[in-house]
Image (cartoon, rainbow, N blue to C red):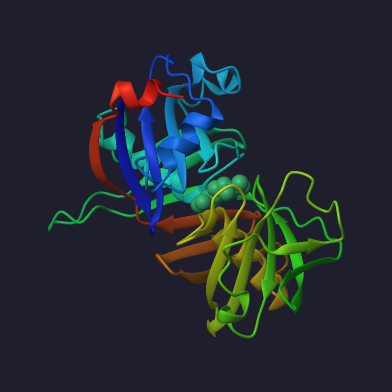
Amino acid sequence: MPFLKGHGAENDFVIVPDPDGRVELPPATVARLCDRRAGIGGDGLLRVVRSALHPEAAAMAGEAEWFMDYRNGDGSIAEMCGNGIRVFARYLLRAGLAGSGDLAVATRAGIRRVHIAKDAADGTPGDITVDMGRAHLPGGEVTVSVGARAWRARNVSMGNPHAVAFVADLEHAGSLLAAPATAPEGAYPHGVNVEFVVDRGPRHVAVRVHERGSGETRACGTGACAVMVAAARRDGIDPAVTGSPATYTVDMPGGQLVITERVDGTVEMTGPAVIVAEGLVDPAWLDKE
Ligand SMILES: N[C@@H](CCC[C@H](N)C(=O)O)C(=O)O
């Protein structure tokens, strides 16, 4: 089975090209491929399949030829992945399946529009911008805790669920080897991604994230968007009210993303995406239980 390896701000993915929808990827196989010691290693996996050939994407095939079948590193399914969609677009460009410029990609959260900037003269790959759709802030009181420390958090959906907590120091989140506790019980029946946020300057924040299904990652694109919107509301900024877009810089351990909320409420994310390797998975290893 052919694969590639790529990352966006060091949120890394195994990419499985499957244009004809022939590759079976049960959760246990995804988890083995994403295993950092016994497999290829990745926070998640991106299967590249024609929308027309996937039951969850066939209805979008008229607008978006390719479906991002995203899986978390533990094999679970998520609705959307912001760093993943940039890496997905980078793969399509490299494979000659898309040109630089504009592209529509089908995801479980709906169609997302992507702009791939041209490479710089020195060959540095151009950044990729994604229209991530509108953030939803359903409200409700949520608490996130790590050990003896607890913080109020804001619920934000970017197609997938996030709990955003503003903290005094990112170190207070601890090792993040285990998922932070959330309350009230049952607030997240399908799990949640948790972001810990500190201010770095005006409209500039730094974040650590614990991702549902992957653990602590070096960056999270949907998380950066959720943080931007939560930070803007905390700062009294709502582009729909002020009539001007707001841009925040979001630092994560693996890199920086620039997030803009437009007047119509849609959120635009810009950041890097790199392919680092390409190869074949040994069929004997793959077929082993
Ligand atoms: N790393 C991703 C988010 C991947 C999905 C997430 N773990 C979930 O389960 O919702 C990103 O860059 O957005």
User: Is residue 262 shown to the viewer in this render?
Assistant: no
Task: Indicate left or right for 128 with 230 as reference.
Answer: left
55 vs 6: above or below: above
70 vs 176, nearest the viewer:
176
Q: Residue at x 42, y 14 (%)?
A: 22
Task: Indicate left or right for 144 with 7 as reference.
Answer: right
| Residue sitting farthest toward the front | 289
- What number of labels is visible? 0
Query: Which quadrant of the structure image shows residue 245?
Result: bottom right
Query: Which quadrant of the structure image shows residue 263?
Result: bottom right
User: Is residue 168 shown to the viewer in this render?
Assistant: yes
Q: Residue 260 location in percent, x, y?
A: 54, 62
222 vs 193, nearest the viewer:
193
Q: Residue 23 location in percent, x, y?
A: 43, 18
Q: Residue at x 33, y 55 (%)?
A: 127
109 vs 129: above or below: above
Which quarter of the rendered picture does the N terminus lie within? top left
Task: Indicate left or right for 94 with 167 as reference.
Answer: left
Q: Residue 232 location in percent, x, y?
A: 65, 71
Q: Residue 79 location in percent, x, y?
A: 62, 39
Q: Residue at x 45, y 50 (%)?
A: 83
| Residue sitting farthest toward the left | 122
Task: Indicate left or right for 144 with 168 as reference.
Answer: right
Query: Which quadrant of the structure image shows residue 20?
Result: top left
